[in-house]
Image: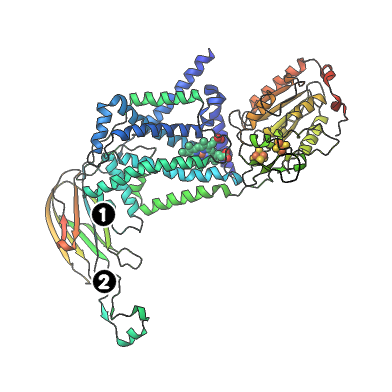
Amino acid sequence: MSALKKILRTGFEHVEDWFDVVFGAKWNPLYQLGALGWFYYWIVVISGIYLYIFFDTGVTQAYKSLEYLTHEQWYAGGIMRSLHRYASDALVVMMMVHLLREFAMDRFRSVRWFAWVTGVPMLWMVFAAGISGYWMVWDQLAQYIAITTAELFDSLPFFGEAIARNFLTDAKLSGRFFTLMVFMHIALPLFLLFIMWIHIQRHASPKVNPPKGLAVGTFCMLLILSFIKPALSQPPADLSIVPTTVNLDWFYMPLYPLLDNVSGITVWIVLVGATALLMMMPWMPPGKRVPVAVVNLDNCNGCSRCAADCPFGAISMEPRSDGSAYEQEAVVNTSHCTSCGICVASCPTATPFRTKTELSPGIELPENKIKELREKTIAASNKLIGGDRVIVYGCDNSLNPAEMSDTKVGVVTMPCIGMLPPSFIDFVLSRKLADGVFLTGCREGDCSFRLGIKWTDARIAGEREPHIRKRVNQERIGKYWAGLTRSKEFFKELTAFRMRLNKLSPMQTESRNDTKENSEKVDA
Amino acid sequence: MPKLRILLGQIVAFILFALLIGYFSNSPSYTYHDPEMALIMVSFSHASEHKEKCRRFTQEEIAALAPNMRRTMDCPRERVPVYVEIMMDGNSLLSKSYNPTGLAKDGSTSIYESIPVKPGQHQLIARLRDSKREGGFDYESSISISLEPKELFIIDFRKDLDGFLFSER
Ligand code: HEM
Ligand code: SF4
Ligand code: SF4
């Protein structure tokens, strides 16, 4: 399983490289799949409302009303119909790629089960909504779907009388089913919206809107496609003849040909089995539970920065429980915390400069303490010699920079680069532990822990608390967001960074900025 | 001009995506039923005879029943399978036995079969057995039909209408 994941992830990252070139990291559609899904959904809903205004919900008139929309009103109704169809198709593509990608990137296991498990019923709803939509056209494709779907349900032992019979002779009964489908086609998308909303409940500021440029491009694409290849009906349904050759929408009906060739029960077993397997996947294997973030009230002043930065909304600010004068305290929801450590870097008390008192910030990961991060930094520095010494801070989810540690490069990793308090960069440079600090991690626009890179960039740029101190020479900070596969580019960037360091005047000249705390002894 | 290259790249990416959804939204076509053939469908549901006849309980048996369950007749609910045979021009199209629905096999029997046949003039004989008899049939009908390609010909069965019904054209 993990080998498969690794292959998939590598594959994704190579494709993403291309998209990065063409769209840039900010617009890369592969980093925006969920948001694109929402965008397609809204197109489907809005075009659907328009179609419904003109749609005749009776089985005998439905086909005609759609023919009217498609041909007489091609400039509006026809376009709406095509948009409705193509955005629905795009939604399926998005959803399947999104599923595969979340699997490949391993963002669904253990505490992160929630989005995955709520995603599975969405698969059923999207497909059921699409199929009921094709039913409403009541053309030969709809007739075929009706017969085959009914046969599928008839294969279950619950129904006394064959449902499929209704689509053979009895126009009245197929009318009743038709009304049911119209109802389903409205109810299912509404319910889908509800689950889409549930799906993102464990994400702080979820991406539900694609970047404007990408949205405009996507919409133009759908619009142009609608003009070039308008969505059409097939010949009208006629219960006295058998539907022969049908043009399936392969995004929604890939299983229908299977239904004609294997027994309905087999198809049910496959469907129910696959659903159950998907549902259980977050716990197969369970994935080791890393101890979650812990608040140390002695050092928490209730500033709420950690709560603002947590990408999973796992921190809430509660009334003080320890009788201190501060009003609030941070409380970690242990079942939502992914142990990414991003909150640690938010905390104003997470600074390596304090050595007199025990170095223990307000919030911390028990298995990756700030104190240890400080020790690792110093140990890595001790091995370095020369004038272009670099400390590389990396994350455990991307390429492993530890492999290149040598006398010029010391490597320290953590769960997410978002865990690195900016004061560490100041610490390394002001204590002359290295001549430069280089940061790496997941790809820009697609942090494994969602916001680690975004917050890191903002903190270093001085746009988000905690700011990096002004005295830090930004030229001595380098970064390259490499992901798992871009190691060649990473080396190139690192080498270029070291060349730039060599050209800078030696560190000594900067030491006049040193404050008192910097002159403390560095304990290894 | 890198700006232009990027724009062109995006256009190409969008075109490829549009081609993907534009094509697979209704192609390739799928042949569900050979347009050269007609289709005979046998579709009905029918409650067959009970496996055992009702029988009067003996006095001892009645006494042995729980007071709220006392009755004089014992009527086992299980039904016999329905056996259907369809012959066309002397060849067998279908000969199959169907079990009643329900866990206790006490429901009606549901039959749903589709059989593609060559169009043209045919002599059909439909037979059904819904009783405990060993051989022979309880119902038999025959009809001479002429089928067009793609035509759907339905064989129905209604006990209250005395047996097989053939779809009218
Ligand atoms: C209509 C279909 C779907 C839509 C619109 C949708 C939308 C989204 C959105 C907006 C996010 C948040 C992205 C972010 O802000 O980081 C997300 C995350 C996620 N989705 Fe979906 N999704 C859909 C279907 C699915 C399906 C079918 C699955 C898998 C079975 C799935 C699994 C996940 C997972 C694992 C995450 C990431 C959770 C994490 O980062 O911890 N989604 N989805
Ligand atoms: S470790 Fe990550 S998920 Fe857990 S509370 Fe901190 S920021 Fe949130
Ligand atoms: S960032 Fe630190 S001090 Fe502020 S609320 Fe969180 S734990 Fe407390």
Q: Quadrant of the N terminus of chain A?
A: top right
Are the numbered discs 2 and 1 placed on the same chain, yes or no? yes
Q: Nearer the viewer, mark 2 or mark 1?
A: 2
Query: Looking at this rendering, what residue extends furthest in the top direction?
Result: B1
| SS label for mark 2 | loop
- The structure residue drawn at horizontal position 53% and vertical position 29%, both measured from the top left corner, is A15
| Residue A139 in picture, x, y percent from top left | 26, 39
Q: Quadrant of the C terminus of chain A?
A: top right
- The structure residue drawn at horizontal position 86% and vertical position 31%, both measured from the top left corner, is A522
Task: Tell which of B92 and A357 is nearer to you.
Answer: A357
Q: Earlier in the sequence, mark 2 or mark 1?
A: 2
Q: CA distance from mark 2 to mark 1?
A: 24 Å
The residue that mark 1 highlights is B113
Task: Tell which of B63 and B114 is nearer to you.
Answer: B63
Whether residue A61 is visible here, answered yes or no, is yes
- The structure residue drawn at horizontal position 54% and vertical position 29%, both measured from the top left corner, is A16
The residue that mark 2 highlights is B50
Ligand 2, what quadrant?
top right
| SS label for mark 1 | strand
Check the image and report above or below for A397 versus A172.
above
Badge 2 crowding class, 10 Å Cα cut-off, few under 14, some 14 to 19, many 20 or more, is: some
For disc 2, the chain is B
Amino acid type at mark 1: Glu
